C-alpha cells in the first residue's frame, strides 16, 4: 500500500525572554526549520508573511501581550531617496561593491568584532566567536550572497551584508560596518545600494527586517520612502510613523494555534511510503 504524506513544516514557540527592542517587555518567537529541497519555496512564501531567516530557521515575533514588531520592506519601484540619502550616496561614492558566495573570512570577522564591540557590546551576539560567525554566514539552505564594500583608495573592507535572494526581492539578513566610519552612514548606504541591486534584477522589494515603533534601534527604517509594513496579516504603506502605536493589549496577539492555521504555505511536494 502506498501513502502520500505532505511535507508540511512544523512550527514551534520559544520560551519568553527579555525584549531587545522595548525595555520592560518579554518576547517570544514562532519558528520552523528551513531545510531540504523545498527550503527556497518556504522561505519565499513565509517572508511575505513577516518571517525572517536565521541560518536554517525561519521565525517571526509571537509575543503574548505585544504586537509592536512589524516586518518592513521597501517597494523599489516607488522609492525616491531623500536629500540626506543623496548625500549618503555621494559620501560613499568611493566604495566598490563585491558580491561573493556565503563564505566567512577572517577579515569579515575582524570587522564584525569591531562593530559589535563598538555598537552592541551588551547585545545577544556580543559573545559570538569565529566559528559561530562562520555558521551565521555559511549555514544557509537557500540562495544567499555576501556583499562586501571595499574602499577603492585603501582597499580596506568597510562594510558587509549577508543577503538572501528571494523570488520577489532581496532580504538583508545581517549587516555590519566599520564603526570608525559611522559618520558616513554606512548602514543607510547598504540599504540604498541594495535598492539599486534589486532594481537592476527587476526585484520589487527589499526586506529590511523588523520595524518597531518606539525603539531607537529600529527608527531609521521609517526614513525610507515607499516603506511597507506587515500588520494584521497584510502589507500596507507605513504612512505616518507616529500613528503606529506599540500595541500591548493582551488580546492583540492571536493564540499560537490560530496563528499557525492562518499561515499560507507553498504547494510543497509529497513523498510516498511503501507499506
Image: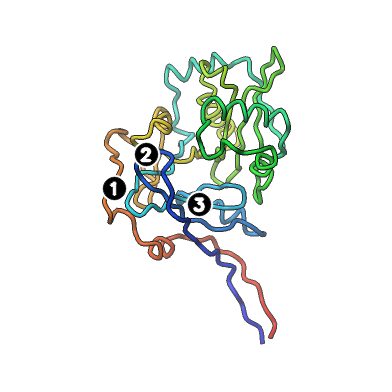
User: In front: 120, or 237?
Assistant: 120
Q: Secondary structure at mark 1?
A: loop
Location of mark 2 (residue): 22
Q: Quadrant of the N terminus?
A: bottom right
User: In front: 226, or 274?
Assistant: 274
Comes first in the chain, label 2 or label 3: 2
Please name which of the two marks, 2 or 3, marks the residue nearer to the observer: 2
**Coordinates of residue 101 in the picture (x, y in percent):** 72, 38
Specify few, some or many for label 3: CA neighbours under 10 Å numbering under 14, 14-19, or 20 or more: many
Comes first in the chain, label 1 or label 3: 3
Give the residue at x 58% y 45%. Answer: 166
Q: Quadrant of the C terminus?
A: bottom right
Give the residue at x 53% y 31%. Answer: 121
Tell whether 81 sits left or right of 92: left
Location of mark 1 (residue): 248
The alpha-carbon separation of the residues under discs 2 and 1 comes to 11 Å
Location of mark 3 (residue): 59
Looking at the image, residue 155 lies above or below residue 43: above
Amino acid at each position: 500500500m502506498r501513502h502520500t504524506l505532505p511535507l508540511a513544516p512544523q512550527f514551534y514557540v520559544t520560551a519568553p525572554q527579555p525584549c531587545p527592542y522595548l525595555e520592560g517587555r518579554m518576547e517570544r518567537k514562532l519558528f520552523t526549520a528551513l531545510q531540504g529541497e523545498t527550503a527556497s519555496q518556504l522561505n519565499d512564501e513565509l517572508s511575505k508573511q513577516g518571517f525572517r531567516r536565521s541560518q536554517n530557521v525561519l521565525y517571526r515575533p509571537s509575543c503574548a501581550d505585544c504586537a509592536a514588531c512589524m516586518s518592513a520592506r521597501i517597494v523599489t519601484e516607488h522609492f525616491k531617496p531623500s536629500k540626506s540619502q543623496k548625500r549618503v550616496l555621494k559620501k560613499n561614492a568611493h566604495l566598490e561593491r563585491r558580491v561573493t558566495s556565503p563564505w566567512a573570512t577572517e577579515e569579515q570577522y575582524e570587522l564584525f568584532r569591531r562593530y559589535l564591540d563598538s555598537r552592541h557590546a551588551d547585545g545577544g551576539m556580543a559573545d559570538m566567536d569565529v566559528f559561530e560567525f562562520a555558521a551565521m554566514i555559511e549555514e544557509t539552505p537557500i540562495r544567499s550572497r555576501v556583499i562586501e564594500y571595499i574602499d577603492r583608495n585603501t582597499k580596506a573592507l568597510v562594510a558587509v551584508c549577508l543577503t538572501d535572494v528571494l523570488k520577489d526581492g532581496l532580504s538583508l539578513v545581517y549587516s555590519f560596518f566599520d564603526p570608525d566610519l559611522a559618520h558616513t552612514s554606512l548602514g543607510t548606504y547598504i540599504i540604498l545600494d541594495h535598492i539599486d541591486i534589486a532594481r537592476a534584477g527587476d526585484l520589487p522589494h527589499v526586506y529590511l527586517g523588523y520595524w518597531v515603533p518606539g525603539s531607537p534601534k529600529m527608527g531609521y527604517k521609517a526614513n525610507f520612502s515607499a516603506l511597507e509594513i506587515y500588520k494584521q496579516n497584510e502589507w500596507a504603506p507605513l504612512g505616518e510613523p507616529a500613528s503606529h502605536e506599540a500595541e500591548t493589549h493582551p488580546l492583540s496577539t492571536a493564540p499560537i494555534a490560530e496563528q499557525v492555521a492562518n499561515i499560507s504555505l507553498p504547494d510543497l511536494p509529497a513523498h510516498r511510503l511503501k507499506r
